Amino acid sequence: MRERGAGVLVQNRASAKLDARCHRGGERARGRRNRECGYEEGSRIAASYDPQPPAALRTGRISRDFLHVPPHTRVMSEPEGLSINTSSGAYRKALWAALAVFSILLLLALVTMYSADGNTTQNQQAAETVMCDRYATVDGSDDAEGTKAAPFNTVQRLVDSLSAGQVGCLRGGIYTEPDKQVVFSDGGKEDDRIILRSYPGETAEFRGSIYIRKGSDYVTVRNMRLDGSYGPVGKGHFKGDRNTKQTVRVMGNNVNIHGNDITNRRPDGDPDLAGTCIILGSSKITAANTSIKGNRIHRCGQMPSINREHGIYASHPRGAEISNNFIYNNADRGILLYPLVGGGVLRTLR
């Protein structure tokens, strides 16, 4: 059944078994019977169309009592409602279209996130290019002003020029010192560190020992290659033994050693040109709140092993954090904590 305006058209679903009375006789009789049976001329669709149906029809309550229904015509009851015969092919096409739209939206979201991450990284790198306050390069001069256009020549001159809150950048290259070490005699402040680092995008290698004295607090050394096998050679652990000083000696508080490549064994195998890579404090000095993070610490100590030279030797530290370092191929222990670590943190070591 379907509505047309205010009236009702009921389609006949019968086939060849319609009432014989509606099919007998000649053309004239057939025309009369067609009108009686409700057929339209030249059609097998039976209908009774009333432009003003009874109130029961207008209210949706349909029964044969209110319709002139030809024989074998089926009237749908109210609960059956109207059914929509949807093509399965059209349904599949709609489903694929929806999936395609979803895939495109997901791809756009991923591209947007990737671009945002890339922009963040680029912004960070761009910000680093303007962080340097003083500069040094292998062909500079210690009589220069330490600017980017007129850089210093040595690491020690660069360190001595820094005050709290300043960053000293070493351009790429290999640096040495006449006495084979760099000494930090002054420190920064909690919110204004003294930072020694490679120039962004370049790698500076210092061959020697870095000594951060007691009282030289809030110092950061980062993003450098440090080779202590070129440092000062002194008395070793046994009679007649010699070795190099530790690559990094930390005696100050709140010192950060981050993102460096640190070693202390000469590749030619000379046992006198090797030693511990990093030492924190001593039996007389407590180095507090040291952070050793994200470094590559390797080839530290004399070979064969003598159980005295390590990747990191933390002696009486307090509040130290040693995390996310790659420590390998060392003569003795990767990390030696002696005797205790007061409030220290060790995690994610590899």
Image: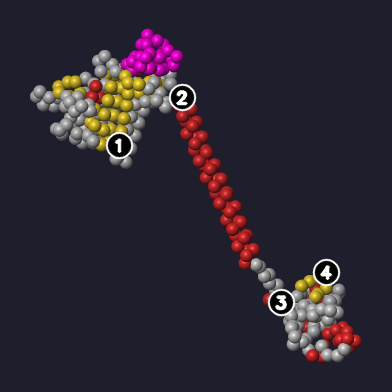
Mark 4 nearby-residue class (10 Å; few <14, some 14–19, many ≥20): few
Mark 1, residues whose alpha carbon is within 10 Å: few (<14), some, or many (≥20)? some
Single out the mark in the foreground, 3 or 1: 1
Question: Which of disc 4 and disc 3 is earlier in sequence?
Answer: 4
Three-letter residue code for mark 2: Thr
Please, is residue 220 above or below residue 2 in the view? above
Quadrant of the rendering where the C terminus is positioned: top left
Q: Residue at x 32, y 21 (%)?
A: 174
Q: Quadrant of residue 3?
A: bottom right
Residue 86 on image: x %, y %:
66, 68
Q: Which residue is mark 4?
A: 5
Q: Would you say 174 lies left or right of 146 here?
A: left
Amino acid type shown at disc 1: Phe
Q: Which residue is mark 1?
A: 326
Q: Earlier in the sequence, mark 3 or mark 2?
A: 3
Query: Which disc is residue 129 wearing?
Result: 2
Q: Earlier in the sequence, mark 2 or mark 4?
A: 4
**Does residue 5 appear in the picture of this structure?**
yes
Instruction: Reply yes or no: does residue 121 show up in magenta.
Output: no
Q: Look at the numbered discs 4 and 1 and tell me whether their residues touch, using CB distance below 8 Å.
A: no
Q: Please state if 88 lies on the left or on the right of 130 as rendered.
A: right
Query: Which stretch did the figure color magenta?
Result: 134-158
Q: CA distance from mark 3 to mark 1?
A: 77 Å
Tell me how far mark 3 sits from mark 2, CA to CA. 78 Å
Residue 78 - label: 3
Residue at the front extreme? 26
The kind of residue tagged 3 is Glu
Residue 344 appears in which quarter of the rendering?
top left
